[in-house]
Structure formats: C-alpha cells, structure tokens
Amino acid sequence: MALLMSEAPPDEQSGDTHLSTHKGGGREQAQLLADYWGPILRGKAEGGELHVYVSAMQRCMQTVDPLMKELGATATIEPRICEVPGLCAPEDRAFYEREVFPKIQAGEEAAAREAVAAHSFSRCGLTKAQVQAAYPWAVAFSDCSDGPFPETEPWYPGAWESERDTAARIAGCREWLFGLARELPPDDAVLLVSHGDTIWKLFAAIIGVDSEAVSHGTMNTSVSSVKIEPDGSVAIDFYNRTPHLREAEGDKYNVDFYQFSGLVRARPHGFAR
C-alpha cells in the first residue's frame, strides 16, 4: 500500500484559512499539482485502487479540488488529519493570548488549563452541507473528535488541542493506516491530503522517528510516499517532493523554499544591489 501526502499552503494563521491567490499562490500550486499527478494517478483511480482522505480544513479541500476533478474520483473528509493544533476563531485566539499564554509563561499551567476548561469556544470550519455543496467529490465523512461530522454546524469544537491530544490523534492515525494496509489489496494506494506539521508527525510515527527530536521544513503541496506492508514493515519511497513546481515560473517556488531554509546566502545588512 502506498501512502501519499500533500501539504496545503495557508495564507492566514488562525481560523479555517483558505488558499492564497497572491501572485498565483496556493491556488496556482494546487492546479500544478493536479496537472502533474492527475495522469500518474488516473490508472489507480479508474481501477478503484485509489482511496482519498482529505483534511476537513478548507484549504486542503481547495488544494485537492483540481486533482479530484481531473481524476473524477471521490474522497472521504477526514478530521483526524487536520493541522496541529486545530482551528481557533479570532476571538478565541485573543482569549488565549490574553488569558492563557501569560499563565503558561508564568509557569501556572494548572490555572491555564482551568481557564481553557471554563471558556466557551466558538465552533470553527465548514458544515457537511457546505462541504458537499462546494465539493461534490466529498461523498463520505469520518467522525470528529466530539462525535459524528455535523450536518449544519461547523465541524471543529473550537479549542486548540494540547500536545497530549495531538500525540494521541497521530497515534490513532498511525494505527488506522496500518489497519488499512492489512485490509486493502497490496496494490491499492491511499492518498492523504493534509498539512505540514501533521504530515511530519504522522510520517515520523510510521517510520519510528521522534518527530519532536528532528526539525524539518515541508514544501507547500509537497508529496511524500511510504509503503506499509500487511505485516507492518515499512519502506520509504520519497519525502517532500515537488516535481510539479519545478517548471513553474523558473522554479520560483522551490527557490523560495531554499531561501527560507537558509540554503541561499543572506546578503550583509545594508548591502544593496
């Protein structure tokens, strides 16, 4: 079983963000992803050998939308592969900054937990009806952390998850994927459309690496592949690839990432070309 994961690029830092359209941005990258991977995955899709699971955050649905249209495939909306640490409405983010983070910085973790427990959070994200209206390929919905995927209210309960909650979610996803490896035919492929931190944590859990001990950077719309055998053995095919971006505008997306990663030599302060 092959597992492919693609990260969606956000343009905001709180709430249920959408793809950027600035200079093409995430929407352009999503189309490039579809143009490249559509022909590669078409045979799997037409043969019923491709199983697609998409994060319930809207930027991931926007990212995979061109590919799903290209393939004529269907997908399951999967809350378990949402980004760390979940969604948070702007007013609740302000609450964290005002009431919670200062307590944590002061070492008052018990008081911080009490404040979070007493706060009434706003639900975030799209409803099932909204997802189905925007993305007809979304034909199935997995359960959320607090129950079935709601029909008419936002899917996420609102509070940011703790590190313990994140670890439990990732561990559950790992067991789910290893279960699929035992259940599905060996030539089937599972495509997860998720986010940078979640991809790294899940990838690390699959291959047995401590995700907190290794720093990493993940390209927007990067694709990774790992094979999980029915007996639980694992083989890495590749990680963090972006072949679909290499020809785009003189490879600007990859070059931007190399600069962000520190591979491009910084100019001295005050230097002007």
Image (spheres, rainbow, N blue to C red):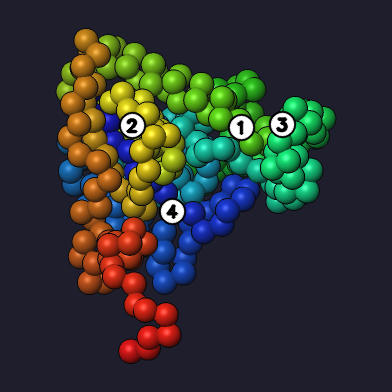
Q: Mark 2–mark 1 contact, CB under 8 Å?
A: no
- Three-letter amino acid code at the position of disc 3: Glu
Q: Going from the N terminus, do you reach mark 4 or mark 3 first?
A: 4
- Three-letter amino acid code at the position of disc 2: Phe
Which residue is painted at 34% across and 58% down in the image?
261
Asked if residue 255 is positioned above or below residue 197 in the image, the reply reads below
Name the one closer to the observer, 78 or 177: 177
- Between the C-alphas of marks 3 and 1, the distance is 15 Å
Label 1: how many Cα within 10 Å (few below 14, some 14–19, many 20+): some
Disc 4 marks which residue? Answer: 9
Nearest to the eye among marks 3 and 2: give it: 3
Label 4: how many Cα within 10 Å (few below 14, some 14–19, many 20+): many
Disc 3 marks which residue? Answer: 109
User: Where is the C terminus found, in terms of image quarters?
Assistant: bottom left
Q: Quadrant of residue 264?
A: bottom left
In the rendering, at what x and y percent does residue 144 appear?
58, 25
Q: Going from the N terminus, do you reach mark 3 or mark 2 first?
A: 3
Disc 2 marks which residue? Answer: 203
Nearest to the eye among marks 1 and 4: give it: 1
Which residue is painted at 56% across and 37% down in the image?
85
Q: Going from the N terminus, do you reach mark 2 or mark 4 first?
A: 4
- Between the C-alphas of marks 3 and 2, the distance is 30 Å
Asked if residue 200 shows in the view, the reply is yes
In the rendering, at what x and y percent does residue 21 appear?
47, 65
- Between the C-alphas of marks 2 and 1, the distance is 20 Å
Disc 1 marks which residue? Answer: 161
Q: Going from the N terminus, do you reach mark 1 or mark 4 first?
A: 4
User: Where is the N terminus found, in terms of image quarters?
Assistant: top left
SS label for mark 1: loop
